[in-house]
Amino acid sequence: MSVLRILYLGLAVWGAIHPMSWFVAWFDENGYDVWAMVDAWHVNAATSGLVWDLTIAAIALTLWIIAETWVRRNWLALIAIPATFCIGVSCGPPLYLFLRTRPVT
């Protein structure tokens, strides 16, 4: 495996674990209510802007993944879409790049 692929994989793992640790800490303090967390994301204009920034980035990534998967027929790369929306933008793009750069057989 190339150094670049290892870096992509490392970033995907880090992007899954590090932000999730903050979410788990928030849930521990405030209870396991997803809608309360969504409300917390919109507590002020700065956080709402960040939420929309990440949402737009996730949608753009999804379109890119679908378009490239259609052309390249790399169906496994579609797993980056649920990773992006269920884990986060910190995990989805590096996971997709890891899957996209695998050797073609």
Image (spheres, helix red, strand yellow):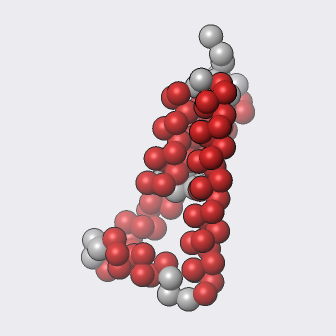
In the current view of this chain or complex, which residue is farthest to the top? 105
Asked if residue 14 shows in the view, the reply is no
Q: Is residue 18 above or below residue 31?
A: above
Q: How many labels were placed on the picture?
A: 0
Asked if residue 52 shows in the view, the reply is yes
**Residue 24 vs residue 80, the one in the foreground:** 80
**Residue 48 vs residue 7, the one in the foreground:** 48
In the current view of this chain or complex, which residue is farthest to the bottom? 44
Could you say where residue 51 lies in the image, as x and y percent from the top left?
A: 57, 72
The structure residue drawn at horizontal position 66% and vertical position 34%, both measured from the top left corner, is 68
Could you say where residue 56 lies in the image, as x and y percent from the top left?
A: 63, 63
Could you say where residue 31 lies in the image, as x and y percent from the top left?
A: 27, 76
The structure residue drawn at horizontal position 64% and vertical position 68%, both measured from the top left corner, is 53
Quarter of the picture containing the N terminus is top right
Left or right: 25, with 76 as reference point: left
Could you say where residue 32 lies in the image, as x and y percent from the top left?
A: 28, 71
Name the quadrant containing residue 24.
bottom left
**Residue 52 vs residue 27, the one in the foreground:** 52
Quarter of the picture containing the C terminus is top right
Q: Is residue 26 above or below residue 5?
A: below
The structure residue drawn at horizontal position 66% and vertical position 27%, both measured from the top left corner, is 71
The structure residue drawn at horizontal position 58% and vertical position 64%, both measured from the top left corner, is 55
